[in-house]
C-alpha cells in the first residue's frame, strides 16, 4: 500500500532514510525468509518515496525487541536520530522497532524533536502531529501488550505439559529423547560406558574416608571429555 506522501517535505528528503530490519529469534532468522525479505524491500520503497540515500540497519537480527540493551542496531538508530542525521525511519511494523514503551516513546520524542518521519506498512507518521503521535503511541502500547500475551500463552503451555508429566526442559547426560518421545540411553556406546564407569567407581569408593583419592595409585584415569 502506497501511503499519502504529503507529509514528506524537502527537509526529510535532504537527510538519509534508514530501514530497520529485525527478527526476534535465531529460529525466525533461519526459517522466516519471506518476512526478512519484505523488510529489506523497504529500501526500494524509500527510493520510490523520493529518498536518494537509503541505508539498512540489520544488526539486531535474532534479538528480541523487549529491550534495547543488547540491540546495538537500535541504539545506533536512536543516536543517529538524536543527532539529526535521519530524515525517515522505515520498518515493516512498529513492533520491529520496539516492544516496550520506554524505548518506543524515547524514539518518538527524538523523532518529534529532530523532525524525523516514521514509515511502516500502513502509513507515514510525523510525531509532531498530535494525531500521528496518538496513533503511534497506541501501536506501541499494543506491541508491548502483545509481547506479554505471547509470554503468557507460552507459560500456560509449559504448565499444561507439566501437569501431564510431559514437560522436559533438559535431560541428564547420557539420555536422549527418541523419535517417539520416549527417554532412552544415549546411542553412543562410549558415552554409556563412560557413565557406567563413573557410577561403578563411585560405588567402589563411596565407603572411603573423606578426602581419600577416588582413583587408586597406579590406575589409569578415565577420560570423560567426550560425554
Image (cartoon, grey):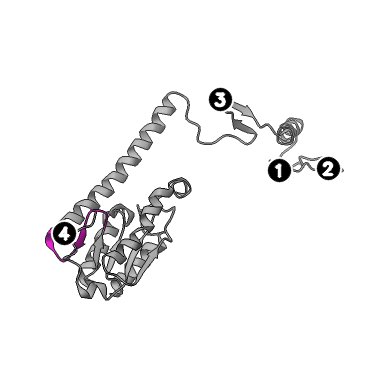
Tell me if label 4 and label 2 are in contact, CB under 8 Å: no
Mark 2 → mark 1, Cα distance in angstroms: 17 Å
Precedes in sequence: disc 1 or disc 4: 4
* Among the two numbered marks 1 and 3 on one chain, the one whose residue lies closer to the N terminus: 3
- Residue depth check, mark 2 versus mark 1: number of the one nearer the observer: 1
The image quadrant where one finds the C terminus is: top right
Q: Where is residue 157 in the image (x, y as percent from the top left)?
A: 38, 32
- The mark that comes first in sequence, 4 or 2, is 4
Sequence order check, earlier mark of 4 and 3: 4
> Between marks 4 and 3, how big is the CA–CA gap?
53 Å
Decide which of 152, 95 is in the foreground and name it. 95
Marks 2 and 3 sit apart, C-alpha to C-alpha, by 39 Å
Work out whether 58 lies above or below 138: below
Question: Circle 4 — which element?
Answer: helix
Q: Which mark is residue 220?
A: 2
Residue for point 50% across, 32% down: 168
In whole angstroms, how far apart are the C-alphas of marks 4 and 2?
A: 74 Å
Image mark for residue 180: 3
Circle 2 packing at 10 Å, graded few (<14), some (14-19), many (20+), is: few
What distance separates the C-alpha of mark 1 from that of mark 3?
26 Å
Res. 97 visible in picture? yes
Q: In the picture provided, is 210 more to the left or to the right than 141?
A: right
Question: Is residue 200 placed above or below 213 in the rendered structure?
Answer: above
Image location (x, y in percent) of residue 111: 24, 67
| Dot 3 alpha-carbon crowd within 10 angstroms: few under 14, some 14 to 19, many 20 or more | few
Q: Mark 1 points at which residue?
A: 226
The secondary structure type at the circle numbered 1 is: loop
- What residue span does the magenta drawing correspond to? 120-134
Amino acid at each position: 500500500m502506497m501511503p499519502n506522501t504529503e507529509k514528506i517535505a524537502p527537509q526529510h528528503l535532504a537527510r538519509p532514510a534508514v530501514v530497520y530490519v529485525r527478527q526476534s529469534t535465531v529460529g525466525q532468522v533461519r526459517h522466516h525468509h519471506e518476512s526478512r525479505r519484505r523488510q529489506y524491500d523497504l529500501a526500494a520503497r524509500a527510493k520510490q518515496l523520493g529518498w536518494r540515500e537509503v541505508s539498512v540497519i540489520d544488526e539486531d537480527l535474532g534479538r528480541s525487541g523487549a529491550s534495547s540493551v543488547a540491540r546495538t542496531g537500535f541504539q545506533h538508530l536512536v543516536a543517529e536520530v538524536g543527532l539529526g542525521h535521519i530524515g525517515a525511519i522505515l520498518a515493516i511494523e512498529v513492533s520491529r522497532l520496539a516492544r516496550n514503551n520506554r524505548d518506543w516513546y524515547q524514539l518518538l520524542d527524538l523523532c518529534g524533536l529532530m523532525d524525523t518521519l516514521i514509515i511502516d506498512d500502513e502509513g507515514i507518521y510525523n510525531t509532531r502531529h498530535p494525531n500521528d503521535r496518538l496513533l503511534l503511541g497506541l501501536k506501541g502500547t499494543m506491541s508491548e501488550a502483545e509481547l506479554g500475551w505471547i509470554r503468557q500463552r507460552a507459560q500456560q503451555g509449559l504448565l499444561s505439559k507439566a501437569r501431564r508429566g510431559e514437560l522436559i526442559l533438559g535431560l541428564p547426560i547420557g539420555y536422549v529423547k527418541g523419535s517417539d518421545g520416549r527417554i532412552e540411553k544415549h546411542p553412543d556406546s562410549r558415552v554409556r560406558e563412560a557413565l557406567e564407569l563413573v557410577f561403578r567407581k563411585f560405588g567402589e569408593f563411596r565407603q572411603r574416608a573423606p578426602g581419600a583419592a577416588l582413583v587408586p595409585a597406579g590406575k589409569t584415569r578415565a577420560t570423560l571429555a567426550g560425554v
